[in-house]
């Protein structure tokens, strides 16, 4: 096991490169996930998040670099690593011909949970998914939220030390998303290490101890959300609203005065108010967010 200071690392990547022909999906990535923490991978479409996840499960093999998962080197020791990892894919791949309980039993076998412990493992997973009452239901009969809970619980049937979540709440309504956040936060407080890719800034802000922002296969920033906000966007932002011509003017004026700006579609946000010499524009003041940092660094709007 490799350590960062005294903390063992659940994941350690150094200089990882993955190419698909001409495309460099991951271009020299370093990533640490200290044990017992939740790390959020943020990035616009095509940034390389899913490829990074696939490298960690050895579904894809890196062209260069070092990969260690729970102290095991990939790809050589991927079997040992996988045995202690839970994975929830971005696309729901539950077996719709089986019931809730049968889906969990299949995974208890796949993950080689000893026969004597299998029943208890399935019951525990049903509790995590809060689907005890629906154990006999076919997957097709479940709501979207229930299916997602089952997908996560299925990854936990063998009590993994590390959970890899690829876009765990994509396409779900806000209420269901919050339910899943509670589930994920609970797992982290029990000491499970988590790496989670996400499009949703709020998800990363709420759940992740540290986030890494990726763009074009590279890390453009990483750290605690609060620290990244202070460093890149400052404490406060002023938003200027108005017709497009006003926005163009406000943007130019702010930049002349040495401010950083970003477009939000309907407004211009003026960042790092404490950093420039000129006077700040008139507008609505609000606290800076991780989304400001994200857009500033990747040039992309959040979905
Ligand atoms: P999204 O949020 O859209 O899932 P992502 O950050 O997960 O995006 P990846 O899916 O890792 O991004 O893709 C990174 C780049 O690698 C993209 O340009 C993508 O087209 C390319 N890529 C990924 N998988 C393959 C593949 N199997 N063959 C060829 N190119 C691929």
Image (tube, rainbow, N blue to C red):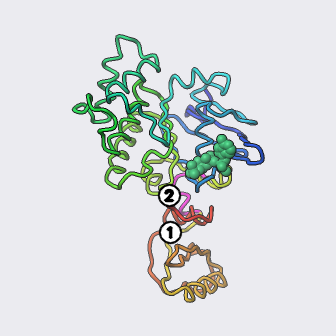
In this view, the residue farthest toward the front is: 97
Q: Which residue is at 55% across, 65% downward?
A: 301
Quadrant of the image occupied by residue 10: top right
Q: In the rendered image, is residue 30 in sight? A: no
Q: Check the picture and name the quadrant holding the N terminus.
A: top right
SS class of the residue under badge 1?
loop
SS class of the residue under badge 2?
helix
Give coordinates of residue 25: x percent, y percent: 69, 46
Magenta includes 227? yes
Label 2 beta carbon within 8 A of ligand 1: no
Give coordinates of residue 240: x percent, y percent: 50, 82
**Relative to 109, does residue 55 appear above or below in the rendering?**
below
- First along the sequence among labels 2 and 1: 2
Q: Which residue is at 38% across, 41% downward?
A: 148
Task: Kindly identify which residue carries mark 2.
Answer: 226
Q: In the rendered image, is residue 65 in sight? A: yes
In this view, the residue farthest toward the right is: 22
Q: Which residue is at 21% across, 32% downward?
A: 133
Magenta includes 173? no
Give coordinates of residue 78: x percent, y percent: 61, 24
**Relative to 263, does residue 79 appear above or below in the rendering?**
above
Task: Kindly identify which residue carries mark 1.
Answer: 235
Quadrant of the image occupied by residue 248: bottom right
Give coordinates of residue 230: x percent, y percent: 54, 63
Which portion, as a residue range, is magenta?
222-231
**Relative to 180, does residue 3 appear above or below in the rendering?**
above
């Amino acid at each position: 096991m490799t350590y960062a200071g005294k903390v063992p690392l659940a994941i350690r990547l150094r200089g990882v490169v993955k190419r698909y022909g001409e495309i460099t999906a991951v271009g020299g990535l370093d990533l640490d996930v200290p044990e017992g923490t939740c790390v959020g991978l943020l990035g616009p479409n095509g940034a390389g998040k899913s490829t990074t996840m696939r490298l960690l499960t050895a579904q894809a093999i890196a062209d260069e670099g070092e990969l260690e998962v729970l102290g095991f080197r990939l790809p050589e020791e991927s079997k040992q690593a996988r045995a202690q990892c839970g994975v929830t894919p971005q696309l729901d791949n539950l077996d719709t011909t089986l019931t809730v309980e049968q889906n969990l039993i299949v995974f208890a076998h796949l993950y080689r949970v000893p026969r004597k412990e299998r029943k208890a493992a399935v019951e525990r997973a049903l509790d995590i998914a809060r689907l005890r009452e629906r154990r006999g239901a076919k997957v097709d009969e479940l709501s979207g939220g229930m299916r997602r809970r089952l997908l996560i619980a299925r990854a936990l049937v063998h009590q993994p030390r590390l959970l890899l979540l690829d876009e765990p709440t994509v396409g779900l309504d806000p209420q269901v998303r919050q339910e899943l956040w509670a589930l994920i936060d609970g797992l982290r407080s029990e000491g499970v290490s988590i790496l989670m890719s996400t499009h949703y800034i709020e998800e990363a802000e709420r759940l992740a101890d540290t986030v890494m922002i990726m763009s074009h296969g590279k890390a453009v920033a990483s750290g605690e959300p609060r620290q990244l906000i202070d460093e890149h966007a400052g404490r406060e932002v002023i938003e200027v609203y108005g017709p497009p011509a006003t926005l163009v003017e406000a943007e130019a004026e702010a930049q002349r005065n040495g401010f950083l700006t970003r477009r939000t579609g309907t407004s211009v946000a003026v960042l790092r108010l404490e950093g420039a010499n000129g006077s700040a524009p008139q507008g609505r003041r609000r606290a800076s967010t991780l989304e400001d940092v994200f857009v500033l660094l990747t040039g992309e709007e959040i979905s």
